[in-house]
Image: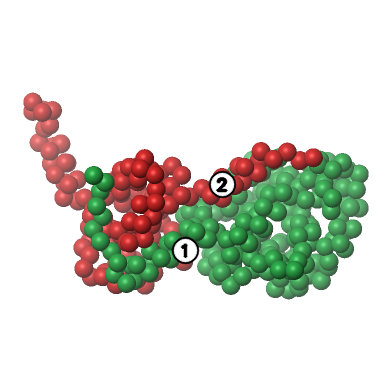
Chain colours: A green, B red
């Protein structure tokens, strides 16, 4: 199975969190099928514009285009306290919204991609997963041109563009990569928070090198 | 002209300067706890990294808000998060780092906040890659 690597994985997680927050703000993000279709639609439009932001590979699956990495991403965000998934309603938590708020600068420097995600989320705010699933079957695969309905299960429906062919890439420098590695990981986030509390309360001692 | 020990006055001066300019590490309780939870081999690598940071703490990446004021030094799959006291004061990052004993630290001090693994996300994704669809 094809998956993203390195900083692309962080971009995927960050954009996934953004898409969830946006979709649950304007309407109801009712279930994984709807989330997958929103991501598919957003990445399809990005690919059409020659952009590389979302880096998911979508396969034809039981409910149309499906990205196992996006499914893992949702589970990661839930496990790390940034998203909740209760009774099929997916929402960003207060911590998740805080991460997005803190990363305003990153959102700002990738404004066009974020706007694209927003417009997809807004356009489908009141759609159900089923409605979106039905609509997507009649469209051609951006990768093969074949109708999605006719593609065999397990075959690729959409792949991100090669970066060398893209007219626009998601901009994120090394400082942001390292910041997101911490913010998107609950144990790192909490451990650093504890360290900051130690500093505030004066629990700092000279470092003793190993003997 | 090099001496018998292979050192000339210039290299001696360099070594003296390097020692004089050496930054002094301080550690939060959390750092010490995180360090104690690492394998001995990783601890040694981190210890070496702390010595490298003490020589040139600026050879690291600055983190962004909300972690502003802190730096990240990578050693393989691990990271050391720290702040340089002189930089913190110069750039007015005191409000981000909030060390209560700020004034007790000299300009050559740096605070080790935490150490930990940086690749949990990447490891899980790599595992995903091995799954076969069908």
**Residue B42, horizontal then vertical, whole percent:** 38, 43
Looking at the image, residue B39 lies above or below residue A98: above
Looking at the image, residue A134 lies above or below residue B18: below
Q: Please tell me which residue is depicted at 87% across the width and 63% down the height of the picture.
A: A131
Q: Please tell me which residue is depicted at 84% across the width and 43% down the height of the picture.
A: A153
Tell whether A141 sits left or right of B40: right
Location of the C terminus of chain A by quadrant is top left
Residue A125 seen in this snapshot: yes
* B41 vs B63, nearest the viewer: B41
Quadrant in which residue B3 is drawn: top left
Q: Please tell me which residue is depicted at 39% across the width and 51% down the height of the picture.
A: B37
**Residue B22, horizontal then vertical, whole percent:** 21, 50
Tell whether A120 sits left or right of A64: left
Quadrant in which residue A124 is drawn: bottom right
* A204 vs B50, nearest the viewer: A204
Front tag of 2 and 1: 1
Tell whether B111 sits left or right of A118: left
Residue A111 seen in this snapshot: no
The numbered dot on residue B122 is 2
Location of the N terminus of chain A by quadrant is top right
The numbered dot on residue A190 is 1
What is the crowding at mark 1: few (fewer than 14 residues within 10 Å), some, or many (at least 20)?
A: few
């Amino acid at each position: 199975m094809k998956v993203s690597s390195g900083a692309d994985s962080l971009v995927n997680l960050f954009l996934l969190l953004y898409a969830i927050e946006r979709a649950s703000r304007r309407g109801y993000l009712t279930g994984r099928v709807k989330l997958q279709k929103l991501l598919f639609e957003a990445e399809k439009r990005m690919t059409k514009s020659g952009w590389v932001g979302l880096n998911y590979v979508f396969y034809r699956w039981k409910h149309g285009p499906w990205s196992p990495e996006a499914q893992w991403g949702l589970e990661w965000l839930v496990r790390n306290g940034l998203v909740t998934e209760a009774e099929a309603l997916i929402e960003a938590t207060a911590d998740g919204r805080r991460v997005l708020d803190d990363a305003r600068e990153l959102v700002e420097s990738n404004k066009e991609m974020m706007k694209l995600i927003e417009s997809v989320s807004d356009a489908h705010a009141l759609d159900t997963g089923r409605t979106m699933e039905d609509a997507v079957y009649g469209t051609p695969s951006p990768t093969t041109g074949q109708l999605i309905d006719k593609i065999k299960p397990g075959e690729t429906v959409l792949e991100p563009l090669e970066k060398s062919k893209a007219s626009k890439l998601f901009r994120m420098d090394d400082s942001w990569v390292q910041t997101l590695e911490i913010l998107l990981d609950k144990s790192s986030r909490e451990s650093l928070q504890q360290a900051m509390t130690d500093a505030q309360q004066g629990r700092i001692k000279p470092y003793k090198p190993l003997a | 002209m090099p001496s018998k020990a292979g050192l000339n006055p210039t290299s001696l001066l360099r070594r003296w300067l390097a020692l004089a300019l050496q930054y002094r590490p301080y550690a939060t309780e959390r750092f010490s706890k995180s360090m104690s939870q690492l394998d001995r081999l990783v601890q040694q690598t981190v210890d070496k990294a702390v010595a490298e940071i003490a020589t040139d703490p600026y050879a690291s990446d600055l983190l962004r808000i909300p972690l502003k004021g802190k730096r990240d030094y990578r050693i393989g799959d691990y990271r050391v998060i720290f702040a340089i006291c002189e930089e913190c004061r110069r750039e007015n990052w005191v409000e981000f780092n909030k060390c209560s004993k700020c004034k007790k630290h000299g300009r050559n001090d740096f605070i080790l906040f935490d150490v930990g693994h940086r690749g949990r996300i990447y490891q899980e994704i790599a595992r995903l890659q091995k799954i076969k669809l069908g």
